[in-house]
Amino acid sequence: MSKQRPSLITKAPELLECLKAATEARIALGRCGPGLPTAAVQGFLLDHARARQAVWRPLDVDGLERNLTACGGVVVHAASRVVDRAEYLRRPDLGRALSEKSRRALAAKASECDVAFVIADGLSATAVEINAAPLVAALLPLLAEQDFSVGPVTIATQARVALGDDAGVALGARTVIVIIGERPGLSAADSLGVYMTHAPEAGLPDSRRNCISNIRDGGLPVPEAAAKVMSLLLAMRAQATSGVDLIEQEDGIPLVPDARDQRL
């Protein structure tokens, strides 16, 4: 009898197994001859399809509204100047501003408030549907404990991050929190981002915003994200600023030295 032929499938070195266990990135996939094993190729194609679906699939607005209402949010609706999804991807500038109809609708709901939430579909409806309502639910009691007044929760479709500044002005909010679906990758299509601006104005640069990213199972858990949002909000209230001018603190200690400190 002839000896059994050796397998063409080569496993990854054992030294990489601990690294592979610590990340969802595509490493140590092994190989089959000069190519990848079939399972790795099929996994790639599946994740690519999920990423495309996350970008193109419309947000389940009704389901999101039900979840937000259940956790105590007062929901209003808005849209950007974008006509459809294809234009949203081609024209980011139109996604950064409210439509005139939406601007009037939000202005009718305006009342001075400390915080207003804007939940935007962004580039991943999947991320918003999975993570947005749990994050708002985690934040509402924390905001109440710190005496932050909360305005309506705006669900914004075909929206980019900067639309939040437009909405914040219309609602009369001192700080706007944009919760948005992040651009999906091949290892995660459900990643949520949070962008916070104190004293929002239309046309502000990105440097005026603070960002918390990769909020999802397998990334930054919702409870930790909520705690980080509250830490930033308290710093914004104390310093009356946001973005690169904000000095973040942890247990009262600045995370980055203040260049204005004369002791440096």
Image: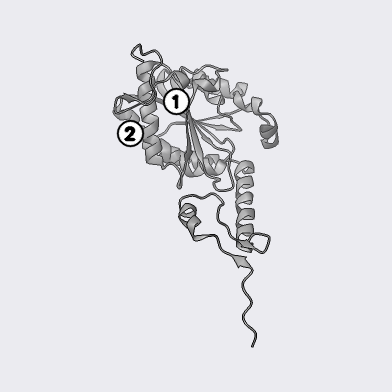
Tally the numbered discs: 2
Q: Is residue 240 above or below residue 214?
A: above
Residue pointed to by mark 1: 116
Closer to the N terminus: mark 1 or mark 2? 1
Q: Position of residue 150 (x, y in %)?
A: 39, 26
SS category of the residue bearing label 2: helix
Q: Residue at x 62, y 54 (%)?
A: 44
Few, some or many residues within 10 Å of mark 1 (<14, 14–19, 20+): many
Look at label 1 and name its amino acid.
Ala
Spatial CA distance of label 1 from label 2 is 15 Å
212 or 136, nearer to the observer: 212
Q: Position of residue 163 (x, y in %)?
A: 56, 25
SS category of the residue bearing label 1: strand
182 or 95, nearer to the observer: 182
Look at label 2 and name its amino acid.
Pro
Q: Position of residue 4 (x, y in %)?
A: 62, 80
In the rendered image, the residue lying farthest to the bottom is 1
Residue 110 shows up from this direction: no
Which of the image's four quarters has the C terminus?
Answer: top left
Q: Position of residue 190 (x, y in %)?
A: 52, 44
Residue 246 shows up from this direction: yes
In the rendered image, the residue lying farthest to the top is 262
Q: Is residue 88 above or below residue 103?
A: below
Q: Residue at x 61, y 46 (%)?
A: 51
Which of the image's four quarters has the N terminus?
Answer: bottom right
Residue pointed to by mark 2: 141
10 or 248, nearer to the observer: 10
